[in-house]
Image (tube, coloured by chain):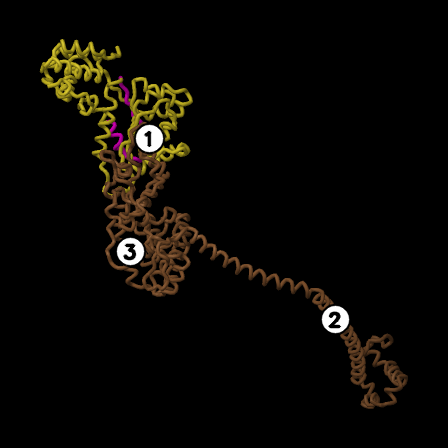
Chain colours: A yellow, B brown
């Protein structure tokens, strides 16, 4: 049996229903359920890279798609209750609108830029969109002052004219984005994903990840000796937990071992060193 | 954006029943405010395909093409896909189906089964039923071109039995009230034109049957004259004529003479059996024939115009020649009228003066009689020849009358006293 064939999957296709993540998802879903007449809210979802922000957005999208199925008499417009996109590099208002238009399935032409913002808003209404989610929003901080201002204007227009709540996800520094814009700041809810604490929370995570990745004996990996080492190496970042488990499982398979040992973890860490915020 | 993952289109425009592929593609592109070419580019489909004739089914139809049409193989459907390499058009259908979330089968149903040679040229694929368009406009349904309407053979609308006409001009008006009025007028005009023809029912039925078989891609039956009839409709160039619908109507009417005349102009490849004239075998119609026919029509119109202008010119020449005499006559007439007017005025003035004088005398006489100063003798005296001849006598008598105080009072002359 080849090791690769039985290696635990790294695909982020499973959702770990932890309280921290669940709270974030439920907040987003609740906001999307708000009456459209109410003043739309902006949710700022922050956390270290690999903490699962994108997974949270994806899960919220899935739940909203279930909660708002396409009505039977829906017209010919594509039905899209959640519009999710990643912010483009060197963002400006136009770039964000074009990215949204692309996601909405609108062909981009040379003259699209003239009415891109209005068209996005039109399509939000026509496609029954209840929530707009924009990932990697910390990229805005790399833009110049004018461009940053322009981008924030685009967000405000999107929420006001489109009458939809907005979720922006990014690194912790993303909280500073709205520092210059008091209006947006007052309309925002900050959701921070904290790093995993050692002990029981880390053990809980390891167990859930190992189960989700189809590894043998998940409880064995959650033992304090393993859990402490994995937590320390990962720096409390969910993605690093996942990567260490994945590579350790690979090494164990390579040595025809059913269970991951400390040696496997050591060897796996030699193959790659996860970045730790600390 | 080309490097990004393509998303399904914003609007899921579905092909409508019997709609042809190009009509649906045009509607789809218009719904996204773009052109078919730009839409293909957006969806990662070979954009060059947008310039091609896409009405024919991408599935090879060589087995369905009748023997007579095989000679023009280039007109038929594209070559079958090489084993393992999907046909570009097949890819296009699948991509469009995915992008619009419409089953590929629904898109495939928009194609026609016949060869391209049986279809109208791309520029004429706006020919359709004005009544259908009017109904769709009123009901809010989108305008479209049906599969049978793009066939060269199709003459009538199945639903309304109305001759098909070119609706390009009406489409340009957009879905406006002006378009509605134009469509209503078109329907009325076409119906009026149709009333001039006595249609042969069997020919009309035959026409519909051939159209349906062409759409299905089935091989036409072996009935006598079938192929010749089909070729007569397909092989001719009258489709470019603005009065195409009338030509087709003539061909399906009992007026053989009229049909024959049309054929003479447009040189049918094959003719209905009942017509005496037949084109020389092996000689197909050329583009120059059409040009010649159109030129003849143009020459006739020019000749008519020339005749009209010549007549006007002659009238103007005649007027120029007659001008001095007419001018003199007019002057004389005016002077005569002025003189007559002057004479009338002078006579009127004189007559007024005379009548005033006469009235003065009469009044004086009346007052004299009323005051008793003159009696009947006086009046009678006036009739005396001596009195009328001798003015002095008459004046003396009057002076005596005027001298009387009562008369002076009556006429309010000085010296009568204010007493009474």
**Marker count (numbered):** 3
Q: Nearer the viewer, residue B374 or A213?
A: A213
- Real-space Cα distance between discs 2 and 3? 85 Å
Find numbered disc 1 in the image and state the secondary structure of the residue it sits on: helix
Return the residue nearer the eye: A234 or B73. Answer: B73
User: Residue B285 placed where, x, y %?
Assistant: 39, 53
Q: Which residues are magenta?
A: A27-48
- Residue linked to disc 1: A100
Which image quarter is the N terminus of chain A in?
Answer: top left
The residue carrying mark 3 is: B227
Instruction: Tell me which label, 2 or 3, sits earlier in the chain.
Output: 3
| Chain of the residue on which disc 2 is drawn | B
- Quadrant where the C terminus of chain A is found in the figure: top left
Q: Please identify the quarter of the rendering in which residue B316 is found.
A: bottom right
Q: Is residue A147 above or below residue B349?
A: above
Which residue carries the number 2 mark?
Answer: B336
Q: Viewer-proximal residue, B293 or A212?
A: B293
The disc numbered 1 marks a residue on which chain?
Answer: A
Closer to viewer: mark 2 or mark 3: 3
Is residue B192 visible to us here? no
Q: What distance separates the C-alpha of mark 3 from that of mark 1? A: 56 Å
Question: CB under 8 Å between callouts 3 and 1?
Answer: no
CA gap between label 1 and label 2 equals: 93 Å
What's the residue at 30%, 22% (across, down)?
A: A136
Place of residue B388 in the rendered image (x, y in percent of width and height, measured from the top left): 86, 86
Whether residue B203 appears in magenta in the rendering, the answer is: no
State if disc 2 and disc 1 touch (CB < 8 Å).
no
């Amino acid at each position: 049996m080849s090791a690769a064939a039985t290696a635990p999957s790294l695909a982020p296709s499973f959702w770990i229903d932890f309280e921290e993540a669940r709270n974030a998802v439920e907040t987003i879903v609740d906001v999307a359920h708000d009456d459209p007449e109410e003043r739309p809210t902006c949710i700022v979802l922050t956390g270290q890279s690999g903490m699962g922000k994108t997974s949270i957005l994806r899960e919220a999208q899935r739940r909203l798609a279930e909660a708002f199925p396409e009505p039977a008499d829906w017209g010919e417009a594509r039905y899209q209750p959640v519009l999710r996109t990643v912010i483009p590099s060197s963002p400006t208002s136009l770039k964000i609108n074009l990215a949204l238009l692309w996601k909405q399935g609108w062909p981009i032409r040379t003259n699209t830029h003239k009415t891109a913002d209005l068209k996005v808003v039109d399509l939000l209404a026509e496609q029954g969109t209840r929530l707009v989610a924009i990932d990697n929003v910390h990229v805005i901080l790399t833009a110049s002052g004018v461009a940053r201002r322009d981008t924030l204007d685009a967000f405000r227009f999107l929420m006001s004219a489109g009458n939809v709540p907005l979720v922006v996800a990014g690194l912790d520094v993303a909280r500073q984005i709205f520092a210059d814009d008091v209006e947006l700041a007052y309309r925002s809810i900050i959701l921070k994903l904290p790093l995993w604490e050692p002990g029981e929370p880390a053990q809980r995570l390891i167990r859930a990840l190992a189960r989700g990745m189809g590894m043998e004996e998940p409880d064995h990996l959650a033992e304090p000796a393993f859990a402490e080492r994995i937590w320390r190496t990962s720096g409390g970042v969910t993605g690093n937990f996942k990567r260490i488990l994945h590579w350790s499982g690979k090494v164990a398979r390579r040595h025809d071992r059913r269970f991951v040992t400390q040696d496997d973890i050591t060897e796996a860490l030699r193959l790659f060193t996860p970045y730790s915020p600390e | 954006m080309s490097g990004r993952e393509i998303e399904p289109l914003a609007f899921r425009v579905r092909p409508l029943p019997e709609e042809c592929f190009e009509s649906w593609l045009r509607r789809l592109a218009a719904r996204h405010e773009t052109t078919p070419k730009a839409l293909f580019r957006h969806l990662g489909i070979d954009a060059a395909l947008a310039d091609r004739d896409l009405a024919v089914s991408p599935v090879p139809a060589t087995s369905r093409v009748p023997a007579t049409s095989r000679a023009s193989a280039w007109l038929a459907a594209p070559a079958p896909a090489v084993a393992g390499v999907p046909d570009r058009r097949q890819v296009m259908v699948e991509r469009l189906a995915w992008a619009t979330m419409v089953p590929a089968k629904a898109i495939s149903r928009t194609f026609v089964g016949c060869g391209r040679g049986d279809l109208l040229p791309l520029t004429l694929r706006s020919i359709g039923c004005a009544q259908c368009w009017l109904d769709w406009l009123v009901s809010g349904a989108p305008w479209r071109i049906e599969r049978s309407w793009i066939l060269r053979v199709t003459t009538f609308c199945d639903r309304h039995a109305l001759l098909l006409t070119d609706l390009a001009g009406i489409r340009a008006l957009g879905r406006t009230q002006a378009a509605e009025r134009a469509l209503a007028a078109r329907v009325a005009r076409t119906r009026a034109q149709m009333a001039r023809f006595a249609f042969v029912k069997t020919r009309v039925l035959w026409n519909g049957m051939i159209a349906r078989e062409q759409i299905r891609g089935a091989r036409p039956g072996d009935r006598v004259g079938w192929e010749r009839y089909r070729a007569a409709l397909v092989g001719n160039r009258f489709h470019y004529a603005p009065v195409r619908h009338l030509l087709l109507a003539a061909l399906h009417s009992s007026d053989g003479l009229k049909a024959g005349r049309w054929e003479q102009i447009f040189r049918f490849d094959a003719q209905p059996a009942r017509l005496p004239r037949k084109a020389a075998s092996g000689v197909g119609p050329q583009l120059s024939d059409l040009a010649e026919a159109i030129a003849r029509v143009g020459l006739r119109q020019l000749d008519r115009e020339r005749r009209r202008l010549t007549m006007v010119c002659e009238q103007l020449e005649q007027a120029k020649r007659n001008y001095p005499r007419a001018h003199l006559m007019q002057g004389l007439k005016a002077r005569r009228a002025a003189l007559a007017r002057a004479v009338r005025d002078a006579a009127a003035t004189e007559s007024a003066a005379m009548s005033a004088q006469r009235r003065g005398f009469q009044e004086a006489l009346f007052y004299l009689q009323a005051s008793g100063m003159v009696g009947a003798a006086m009046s009678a005296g006036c009739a005396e020849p001596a009195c009328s001849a001798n003015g002095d006598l008459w004046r003396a008598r009057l002076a005596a009358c005027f001298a009387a105080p009562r008369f002076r009072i009556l006429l309010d002359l000085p010296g009568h006293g204010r007493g009474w």
